[in-house]
Image (cartoon, rainbow, N blue to C red):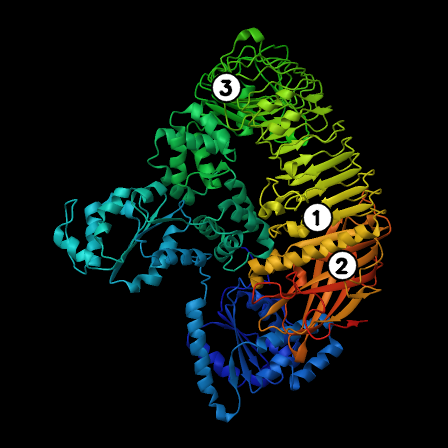
Amino acid sequence: MASSSSSSRQVKHQVFLSFRGEDTRVNFTAHLLQALKDKGWTVFFDDDTLKKGEKISSALSNAIAASILSIIILSKDYASSNSCLGELSDIMDRNRNPTDKYIVLPIFYHVNPSHVQKIGGTFKTSFQKHESKQPADRVQRWKSAFQEVGALKGWHIGGKSDGYETEYIEDVVEYISKELDSNCTSVSEELVGIDDQKKIILGLIEQEHSRVIGLWGMGGIGKTTLADVVYSEICQNFESHLFLRNVSEKIKNVGNESLRNELFSKLLNQKGICINSPSIGHPYQERLNNKKVLVVLDDVSNPDQIEFMGVKHFGPESKIIVTSRDRQVLKNGRANHIYEVKKLNENDSLQLFSTLAFNLLNPAADFQDLSCKFVGYAQGNPLALKVLGSKLYTKSRKEWESEVDSLKQYAEPKMSHILKSSLDGLRELEKNIFLDIACFFKGEKMDTVEKILSNYYMGAMSGIRNLVDKCLLDSIDCYSMHDMLEEIGKDIVRQECKEDPGKRSRLWFPEEVDQVLRYNKGTVSIEGIKLDMFQMDELQLCPSVFESMLNLKYICFYDSKIEKGYRNPKFLVDQVDSISLPNKLRYLCWDYFPLKTLSSFNPKNLVMLILRSGNMEQLWNENDHMNLVNLREIDVSNCKKLRKIPNLSRATNLELLDCSYCESLVELPSLNHLASRDEDKLRVEGCYSLKKFPQVPSHFCYLDLRETEIEEVPDAIKYLHKLERLLLSKSKVEKVSINISKLELLSELNLSECPMVEFPKIPRSLTWLDLSGTGIEEAALSLDSLSNLQYLNMSGSSIQKLMCNITLFGSREFPTVDFPTPSLRSKILNHMRMDRCESLKLVSELPPYMQNLNVQYCTSLEKVSFADQNLYQFDSLGDDLFGMLFCNCINLNPESIDNIEENAMLKIGSLAKKWAARYDWKYQREDFPRLICCFPGNKISADKFKYQRMNSSLSLKIAPNRGSGSRFLVFAICLVADLTHCHRFKYLNCICEYHLTAAGGGDSKSYISKISFFDCSEPNKYNGDHVFILSSNDMVEEDKNYEEASFKFYIIDNDDEVNEEEDYNKVERCGVHVFYVDATERRVAGNKRSFSHDGEEGDGGLKRLK
């Protein structure tokens, strides 16, 4: 039997009761407890723990986590108990979670609520004692929880004048009953994870013109349960109502008329209604039309069933909920809204499974691993989770392990029966497509599957759509299906001939494929074979192995590890020049193809030819004149011996030719004959013998010519007017024709590590340009070339000067320049890499709001400047990181360093302004981007950081809020640290601990912020002192009348814990700057630059504290 762990607890209570036993156990608490029990509510209270008075146990933590509501009885000695404060801290942790619907109700029992909120009176003495005995962080956690609960609404029970305690208890119990009735989320096995979906359906029902609501989903997904929950909640709002379960099954058993008579009898409150004709008489129509009714038609399989039930005659404001596995049924049934019932998420799935497998909320500790496997198999299907959980209840671990193994090959019978019914009524076309995808194509890209199946079957696309509508297929990027449906499909194929796999239509199981091929047992029944060669031993093939498989359309012999560089050919064909392949083949994938040619095969029906890492020297003879009209893709990548691609003039529908890393390939045939397609691609990366730019038709959108011997991009490039991506990195290109600027769709150009020395003339459409490692020494970027450029990489190049000549835009000297409006200026050159350009001396007029600028290791760099921000609109809040890296740029002059600092502060202030205007800060603090700026130096600018100290900590005063509304604080920090020895770190991180102190004894808060910098391992070695300017979402906080802030900084490795005793790279100097943002007016308050700084609020500025 599965034993429960000590940390798991059964779901037994709605209320958690926290109290100080010595104060209230025998009076108020005992009476309240009994009153709650009398109302039928289950209450958790740990009397043993209260008696011992020791620290909170894990059992109590689990009880709090499993409850719906907590009552906290705050009595005079409550704060003197460690266990009470521990309970309270756990309770308030749940209460702070905005996604948790946890309810906390305090009862101030003969204590002043203000003493709780401000820790006054006897509570102050209690906490002083704790501070002398307990760790500071623990006491601070207790204090925060205590103050927070003091601010909540509750009941204050004082002296006799306040009334008898029994009256308070009645009031408390009545209030709690209402809260639990309206807010409690059921943890029963039926309703796990259903609340959010219920709200959506209720919202649809409330819409004025929403009459028929369809619930759509696969069998077992919870359509009936969801409909039942909604029905139960709203049925009392209607004059008549009825939930008709299993409509399709009942119609089979009793007929349409009988079921309709049952429905009308209930809705019209009249026994014995008997309408035996398809039509409904006028009297019944009129009576139905006068009634507001709610009807659920469950499990409908035909739209005629909806119409036959006469729903169109129901009165105004009537609502009809229809559940079905077939979306088309709901569409044809005139559903106003069709809602796809969602599968359970992982947490809800585990909870539902655990309630049935263990009668617990969570799996027993020693069954955690197996529970996750079963939950993974169920893939969020509630019925599958219930069936599996119930089946495993009380069974041993060994039995669980056996069940896991069996599920890999055979679907669970009860689920199989339910899901198989979804296959009833499928046309032969749809059944074949379902079996093909279950056996061969699950997880394959939609486009690939559609190409193959459309060549197999007439009307394949219609069949695929019907399978999706019936929830037998999922179609998001690739075609998939539930694992149980996959096993059902494979089991259907197994049943074709249990004893002899050679007489089945489809083969995929390695041992069975091996048996058929090794012993030449194939027959005309076989239509497809799929095999991962990595899972089998070497196999000697007979040349005639496929001759008897006359109907074979699909061969897929693939190696699942081939992408990782393994070479593991398994098929051996000795002393044979050819192997007979069936002419009906549509798909041939054979990694490590063992023969030198395919000359004996007629590929007239072939759609896809994939022969990766094959042994071929040629595909077929030039004189064979193959009919290739159906061929869409050829992939002969990594065929090291392939010298030539034959004439492809008859392959008019070819969309992809992949010859990458065919090292012996010296030329390509002309491809100008190909029919026009939207996404035709050519890949010849790593064809080291290829010297000539290929002849391709004008509609090609993608050319991968990396690592070739091509020396020039010719003038004819202008004819490739649909080209979007051109990759030539590590090729021999020295010259790029000026005609490339005429390509209006080209968005990506990669010329990295090419020996070119001139900056190419680029088209205005370009968004991504990589010139890293080239010999280019100078570049002047103009608006003409920058109008769409987002990313420029020139790292490791010979560049000496980079000038962004874009300040002409909008200037008085050039008033007629025809370029985009200023609102588009924020989109120009957002990412630039210039790192390791050792000759670079000047970078001028950079866009001021650039998101990422990497100029590390440019040891000759002297001058850096940014364009006027008034010519730009800042609109980059959607990005999560702004980087300005000038590490090891040891020759930067003082003016450039000032420009860098000014730009960093401009970005932080602009981020604060834009963020405040666009977001609800209470819930979107995490959307505030990080900024990391780094450059050599050991000084912090006094103009930009008024608050600074020589060591790693400082304190500062917060300016009083003189405005009428609320505001929040954005902190920018500046640090100086020696990075000479930081190469021992994998990633450099800044830890900032800061504490905000409120005026007048109000709320105080402590935070720890971690900002990751960059990879510091070799060869990224940094030298000497560097200055960091940093900001992040952890540095944004609502101002709750704070008067002082204190900070402490560390620089550590990614895996280190903060420990002051360790010898970290010490922070030598630190500084902080405060931006004050008006949260009420949705703007950054203050000066003409639209945000206020330190000293700009309050009288006479702020004093710096040492």
Q: Position of residue 943 (x, y in %)?
A: 78, 62
The local secondary structure at tag 1 comes to: loop
Residue named by callout 2: 1057
**Image quadrant in which you'd find residue 747:** top right
Disc 2 residue type (three-letter): Glu
Check whether the beta carbons of the residues at disc 3 and disc 1 lie within 8 A of each other.
no
Residue named by callout 1: 867
Q: Earlier in the sequence, mark 1 or mark 2?
A: 1
Q: Earlier in the sequence, mark 3 or mark 2?
A: 3
Whole-angstrom CA distance, mark 1 to mark 2, is: 42 Å
Disc 3 residue type (three-letter): Lys
Q: As displayed, is residue 161 above or below residue 421?
A: below
The circle on residue 521 is: 3
The local secondary structure at tag 3 comes to: loop
Disc 1 residue type (three-letter): Ala
- Total labels drawn: 3
Q: As displayed, is residue 465 above or below residue 70?
A: above
Q: As displayed, is residue 1102 above or below residue 607?
A: below
Q: Earlier in the sequence, mark 3 or mark 1?
A: 3
